[in-house]
Amino acid sequence: MRKPITPSGFRIRELRESLKYSREAFAEKAGISPDFLYHIETTKKDFTTETLKKLCNAFCVSSDYILFGVQNQNQHIEFLLNQMDDNQKSLALDILKIIIIKI
């Protein structure tokens, strides 16, 4: 019997909560069941590389982040921008321009 990858489940839960997803919505987006996600988050079950791939693709995070805690900020920003409509993206770009000018 394989030992669960304990920190990964906790990071997945932190990711879900930081993105303000319910367990059900997060699981649906990743293509897994909410029960299975619960078991992953609580480290009661391990997950396959296929499940890891689904999580990474659905939430634009690297496997390095889920497995080791190494985060690529560009992927996270890309995910957040993809959740915005065109007006929100335009506003975000305007805000970014102001910040860059002030720096």
Image: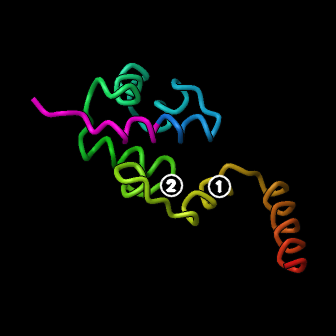
Viewer-nearest residue: 21 or 83: 21
- 78 relative to 57 in the view: left or right: right
The amino acid pointed to by label 1 is Asn
- Sequence-wise, the earlier of marks 2 and 1 is 2
Mark pair 2, 1: CA separation: 10 Å
> Callout 1: helix, strand or loop?
helix
Q: Position of residue 98 (x, y in %)?
A: 90, 72
The amino acid pointed to by label 2 is Cys
Q: Are marks 2 and 1 in contact (CB under 8 Å)?
A: yes
- Mark number, residue 5: none
Q: Residue at x 25, y 33 (%)?
A: 46
Q: Is residue 57 magenta?
A: no
Q: Residue at x 25, y 47 (%)?
A: 49
Rate crowding at label 2 as few (under 14), some (14 to 19) or many (20 or more) other CA atoms within 10 Å: some
Q: Which residue is at the far left?
A: 1
The image quarter containing residue 18 is top right
Q: Which residue is mark 2?
A: 60
Q: Position of residue 100 (x, y in %)?
A: 83, 77
Q: Quadrant of the N terminus?
A: top left
10 over 57 or under it: above or below: above
Q: Which residue is mark 1?
A: 82
Q: Residue at x 24, y 40 (%)?
A: 48
> Callout 2: helix, strand or loop?
loop
Q: What residue range appears in magenta?
A: 1-12
99 over 5 or under it: above or below: below
Q: Quadrant of the C terminus?
A: bottom right
